[in-house]
């Protein structure tokens, strides 16, 4: 009786899992074996791995996701560390999280305004005498905005890791003669590394398939896998090829998850 | 007297409006085992943290071997701490933990390996160097924490309730080991605990604390036999504390009778409190008894019976007896004059010591049971 009751609690989650995780993934894998004429084939994979365009796209995606993750870590760790020292840290943390409640499209459009020829950024550059520059539709602006959007998802797990760190470890380190820097790099950082890994998972994987920002901010100069999938499904209607790239992305995610350990991502994904 | 290794002069610690330490004076000599004893929140750990350098004194001086170290950061002080929850680094092996301090000092590798091996041998965990911290039991973690501190060869080892997480049997065993270790190393131990049994068992000298003040300091026997006030008497061991009145030197009245006692120098007719330890009371025939009590209840404690009784004035008595009594039985109790200890209300330690001087100088051993 108790067994059956416990089983009942699984139904909502089971349904969700089946409908929104297992079924779509199965469909993507299934679709990836069909060409435009609905014939079963492995040609899509052949095309993918033989085409310089696709491989370059993959490399591009990984490279930009890497850059975005790197900049996010470089900004987020010191920020999380600083926030953690503050008196009303939960409040300051809330201010960091706040922008994630706003839709990514709205934020992208806001940046279009800021970076445009007559935008705030160029007004400032003009004011200090540099003159207006092409900011929008550059790779730099794409990385900038992507980093901006991902930062909260990196700060949160790092902040949590710092919060979970027993202050006695820091005292013990000092007690044994460690300077502030030695304490940081031999005790604090290694012990909060799981938080960084969780953050990398939460940032790197979604960054692989960014497509809205590459178009709106990056001006489609960088074609990432995300852009390619969108094109195949909505423009060329080659669902088989789109699914193949999807499968490649899924495999890439599994690889990243494995590399960054068994930590589950603590943040959400921007969408 | 030798140069004290640690001295606190008028140390006060305030957090906002709360005063955690009130004008603490305390001297530690080299090579002795000291204990800060008190209930939680009495400030004992704050004293430890002040000496270790994890917190600053609001006022007063902290001296190490005569030098003021208030402004010396924790990592530059020649004291090491064994933390309450051990604080062993979980991302390092046992050997890496113990070697941590030495690698920071950039000692040569062979020297580090040798000293780590020695320290592990000292805490009887010689073969555990390659283990993960999570693979150790509480008692083993405790020993590693000690090894990690003593490998630094500090002149003072601070121990913050290190036994509180262990089970009773292991705790007793560690008491022997800690005492033994301190005597072999010959360094000063400052041990913090709320467990009076631990304090009595291990210390050369105990500081009894309450609400940010040191109420009494002295050898375990002194503190047990001559507690300065109600709090100390009650906190250290079991005790019968009764209201009484001083009749004359060496004469005190309580429980409706007058008794010979071992205390003097108190004004006649002053209201006082009398302490009698339960194990100093002997059950006897009512005919040759000093007081008669009625047995309420008794508990068998293994090596003795703990008997609760009431006298004719309604005072409660706690008696430890090897032999059982009958519930409801009227029995006599007897005690010797030196088993009584008279406490004055609000007497400070300095006054207490001065008063003791006046009548104990000729006969030092007179308070020994």
Image: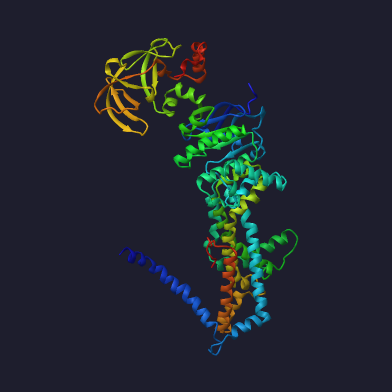
Farthest right residue in view: A129
Is residue A205 visible to us here?
yes
Identify which residue is drawn at 60% across, 56% down.
Answer: A193
Which residue shows up at 59% across the image and 78% down it?
A245
Residue B165, compared with residue A15, is above or below; it is: above
Residue at x 65%, y 24% (from the top left corner): B3
Rendered location of residue B262, percent (x, y) = 43, 14
At 57% from the left edge and 73% from the top edge, which residue is drawn?
A251
Which one is nearer the viewer's eye here, B177 or A130? B177
In the foreground, B78 or B49: B78
Identify the image quadrant of residue B329.
Answer: top left
Q: Quadrant of the N terminus of chain B?
A: top right
* Left or right of B52 on screen, residue B105: right
* Horizontal relation, residue B335 to residue A265: left or right: left
Name the quadrant containing residue A226.
bottom right
Query: Residue A165 at x, y = what percent?
Result: 55, 50
Q: Is residue B327 above or below residue A64?
A: above
């Amino acid at each position: 009786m108790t067994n059956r009751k416990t089983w009942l609690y699984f139904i909502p989650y089971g349904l969700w899992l089946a409908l929104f995780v297992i079924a779509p993934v199965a469909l993507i894998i299934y679709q990836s074996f069909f060409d435009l004429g609905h014939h079963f084939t492995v040609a899509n994979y052949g095309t993918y791995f033989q085409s310089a365009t696709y491989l370059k796209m993959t490399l591009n995606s990984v490279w930009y996701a890497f850059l975005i993750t790197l900049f996010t870590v470089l900004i987020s760790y010191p920020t999380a560390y600083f926030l953690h020292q503050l008196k009303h840290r939960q409040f300051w943390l809330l201010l960091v999280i706040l922008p994630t409640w706003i839709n990514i499209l709205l934020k992208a459009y806001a940046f279009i305004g800021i970076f445009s020829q007559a935008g705030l950024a160029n007004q400032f550059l003009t004011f200090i005498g540099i003159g207006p520059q092409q900011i929008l539709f550059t790779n730099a602006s794409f990385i900038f905005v992507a980093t901006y959007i991902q930062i909260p998802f990196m700060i949160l797990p790092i902040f949590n890791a710092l919060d979970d760190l027993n202050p006695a470890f820091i005292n013990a380190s000092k007690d044994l003669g460690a300077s502030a820097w030695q304490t940081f790099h031999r005790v604090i950082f290694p012990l909060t590394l799981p938080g960084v890994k969780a953050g990398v998972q939460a940032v790197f994987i979604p960054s692989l398939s960014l497509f809205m920002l590459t178009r709106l901010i990056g001006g489609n100069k960088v074609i990432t896998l995300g852009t390619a999938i969108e094109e195949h499904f909505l423009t060329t209607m080659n669902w088989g090829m789109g699914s193949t790239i999807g499968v490649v992305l899924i495999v890439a995610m599994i690889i990243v998850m494995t590399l960054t350990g068994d930590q589950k991502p603590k943040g959400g994904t921007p969408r | 007297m030798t140069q004290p290794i640690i001295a606190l002069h008028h140390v006060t610690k305030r957090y906002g409006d709360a005063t955690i330490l009130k004008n603490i004076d305390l001297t530690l000599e080299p090579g002795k085992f000291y204990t800060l004893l008190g209930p939680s929140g009495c400030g004992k750990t704050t004293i430890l943290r002040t000496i270790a350098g994890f917190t600053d004194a609001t006022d007063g001086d902290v001296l190490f071997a005569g030098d003021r170290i208030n402004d010396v950061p924790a990592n530059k002080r020649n004291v090491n701490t064994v933390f309450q929850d051990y604080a062993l680094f979980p991302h390092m092996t046992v050997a890496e933990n113990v070697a941590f301090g030495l690698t920071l000092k950039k000692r040569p590798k062979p020297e580090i390996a040798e000293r780590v091996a020695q320290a592990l041998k000292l805490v009887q965990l010689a073969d555990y160097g390659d283990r993960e911290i999570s693979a150790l039991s509480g008692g083993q973690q405790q020993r590693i924490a000690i090894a990690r501190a003593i490998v630094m060869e500090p002149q003072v080892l601070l121990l913050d309730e290190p036994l509180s997480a262990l089970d009773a049997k292991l705790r007793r065993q560690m008491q022997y080991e800690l005492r033994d270790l301190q005597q072999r190393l010959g360094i000063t131990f400052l041990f913090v605990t709320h467990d009076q049994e631990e304090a009595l068992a291990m210390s050369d000298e105990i500081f009894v604390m309450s609400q940010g003040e040191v109420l009494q300091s002295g050898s375990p026997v002194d503190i047990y036999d001559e507690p300065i006030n109600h709090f100390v008497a009650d906190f250290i061991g079991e005790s019968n504390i009764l209201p009484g009145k001083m009749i004359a030197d060496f004469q005190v009245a309580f429980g409706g009778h007058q008794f010979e006692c071992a205390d003097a120098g108190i004004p006649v007719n002053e209201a006082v409190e009398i302490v009698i330890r339960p194990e100093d009371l002997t059950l006897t025939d009512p005919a040759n008894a000093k007081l008669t009590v009625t047995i309420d209840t008794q508990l068998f404690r293994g090596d003795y019976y703990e008997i609760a009784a009431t006298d004719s004035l309604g005072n409660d008595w706690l008696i430890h007896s090897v032999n059982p009594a009958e519930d409801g039985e009227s029995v006599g109790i007897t005690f010797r004059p030196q088993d009584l200890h008279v406490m004055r209300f609000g007497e400070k330690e300095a006054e207490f010591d001065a008063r003791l001087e006046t009548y104990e100088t000729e006969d030092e051993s007179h308070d020994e049971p």
